[in-house]
Amino acid sequence: MNYQVVKTGFKQIIDLINEQELFTFIYDDPYILIKLASATLLGLSTFYFSKIWYSYRFFKNRNIPTPPYRFFYGNNLELTRDNNYSEIIQKWTEKYGKTYGYYEGHFPVVVTSDLEIIQEKIFGSRDDNAPDHMLFTASRTKWKVMRNIMNPTFSAAKLREIGPLIVKSADRLNQVLSNEGENEINISEFFKRFTMDSIWMSAFGEDIDVQNNPENKFFKKCEEMFVFMAKTNLTTHISNYFHEFQEIFLQTVIILEKFFSLFIDFNLFYPIIWFTNHVFEIVDRHKMEKGKKKNFLQLLIDAESDAKDDLLNIDDYTKVKLNKKLSQMEIKLNLTLFMFAGYETTSTTLSYATYILAKYPDEQLKLFEAISTVLDKEEDVNSENVLEIEYLEWFVKEVLRIYPIANSAVARRCTKSTKVKNIDVPEGLVIAVDVMSLHFDKDLWGPVDPNEFYPPRHETKRNPLGFMSFGNGPRNCIGMKFALIELKIALCKLILNFEILPSKKFPERLELIETIVRRPKNGYNVILKKRNL
Ligand code: HEM
């Protein structure tokens, strides 16, 4: 019966075409094409909006609480309103419990500060659609292979070789700060140039001396790049509201960019393209020079993975052809990544640390005493002895506990469907860690009030999952040891040289803003008084 209907239908269409009645029909109604297009568009939109409507059942079906959301926008309006993602999700945790969900557009995201969920091993990559050449965005197998090759680059032995470069940058920091005398200064600006000098020297072995040349083009472009990346643009809107089309959109942009770059110089408009192209040039130049200097570039070129054996034990990785070296493109993109990841994070941590030192003179005195009992004079500071100062370790950790910086990075996709604590978790679901709730949890950080700045709390052994400033697990921050050495060298030299005093209008509380990193919104001024050692 059905077959007959279909057959008759087809026959009628063929007859229509044969007799050209279809076209007559079009001539009869000149608007028919517009009508057909509108009908198709309406049909597709209805389908897409039904899909969006259906997406909002995700958390209801699993009995997971959510803050109130709006159709199409989800919770984005509230999340992006004040650029304070971490505080908003912390507030939601207080209201909806340790595990809840929110919608980015109509894309469900689970937020948790429940240690049992966080420690599950099923949460792997950050974004399955992102490019695979960079460690931060690479997914699954590709990430695993790359991370195994790159891990030794950040080993204690390799960092010892890079240490003198950081010391050189820190000496320069003290010299430029001394030049300021006892003027009020916005010290964050000096820290930015210090971290740029040290990451640049450590990455490429090149000394661009940004600290004495604030107008340096690389520095300016890097600054522009961060401003550019923090802005909401079409790509952000697409990934927020039409995430299904994100990949196709990005591919189209790449193709269009390739085409238009024949006529337009994108270096002029996009600092990120300018910056990446220049990093690429440096890598090529370095290759020609065949230098054997100690820097990340050389270490990445030399790096070979010895990870083959342990990878072979893991199902997912057995079929992968293991390339034991990084490709040229991987080296270039990962060095660019180090610049991104290591610049603003470390300088912002130094800004927070100095704010604390200026605000609490007692803390400053304790830290000064702890440092000066190990190091007689500033010239003694090196990348090894700074690691021996226990109170300094607690101090830096406490700064990062109170002011965690890269919280939105601590999120993972679930790599296989499973059930966690009775929640049905499908593959691909994003789980974001509520870092602030963990860092201020009384059970994890008490008995001294976690809102208080109190470095000795780190003397007690704590649950490592309670400290997320560098993330956790195999996908944690690969640059952590480098960052800690850099922070400690800078702080030792600073505090041995200067007493840090608050300025007249020193803020009682820091107002923060969160884009890529969470940082002070307006900066603050201090006065540095030379110590007479
Ligand atoms: C105080 C300074 C820094 C902070 C607070 C910080 C924080 C973080 C955080 C929270 C993550 C995500 C970890 C996770 O998801 O579990 C991360 C990842 C990463 N960081 Fe850092 N970072 C710092 C410095 C650096 C430096 C100096 C470098 C490079 C030289 C670096 C390179 C990276 C890379 C490559 C990743 C991705 C790792 C992966 O996916 O395997 N970071 N960082």
Image (cartoon, rainbow, N blue to C red):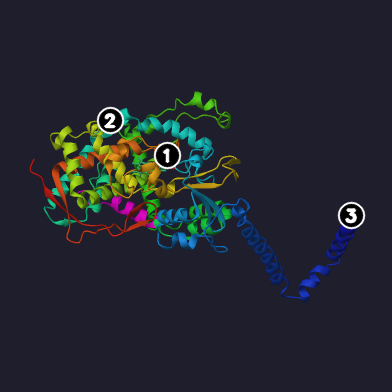
Q: Quadrant of the N terminus?
A: bottom right
Q: Where residue 402 sits in the image (x, y, percent)?
A: 33, 48
> Which residue corresponds to the image point at 40% horizontal and 37% vertical from the top-left?
463
Q: Which residue is mark 1?
A: 465
Secondary structure that dominates the magenta span: helix
Q: Quadrant of ligand 1?
A: top left
Q: CA distance from mark 3 to mark 1?
A: 62 Å
Q: Which mark is residue 161?
A: 2
Q: Is residue 470 visible?
A: no
Residue 276 as seen in the image, left or right of residue 310? left
> Which residue corresponds to the image point at 31% horizontal and 41% vertical from the top-left?
397
> Which residue corresponds to the image point at 10% horizontal and 45% vertical from the top-left?
531
Q: CA distance from mark 2 to mark 3?
A: 78 Å
Category of crowding for the residue at label 1, using alpha-carbon neighbours closer than 10 angstroms: few (below 14), some (14–19), many (at least 20): some
Q: CA distance from mark 1 to mark 2?
A: 31 Å
Residue 213 among those drawn in magenta: yes
Q: Quadrant of the C terminus?
A: top left
Give the SS element for disc 3. Answer: helix
**Image quadrant in which you'd find residue 160:** top left
Circle 1: residue type: Leu
> Which residue corresponds to the image point at 54% horizontal and 25% vertical from the top-left?
312
From the Cβ of disc 3, is ligand 1 less than 8 Å away? no
Q: Where residue 394 sits in the image (x, y, percent)?
A: 28, 39
**Image quadrant in which you'd find residue 243:** bottom right
Residue 130 among those drawn in magenta: no
In-front residue for pair 478/138: 478
Of labels 3 and 1, earlier in sequence is 3
Of labels 2 and 3, earlier in sequence is 3
Q: Which residues are magenta?
A: 211-229
Of labels 1 and 2, earlier in sequence is 2
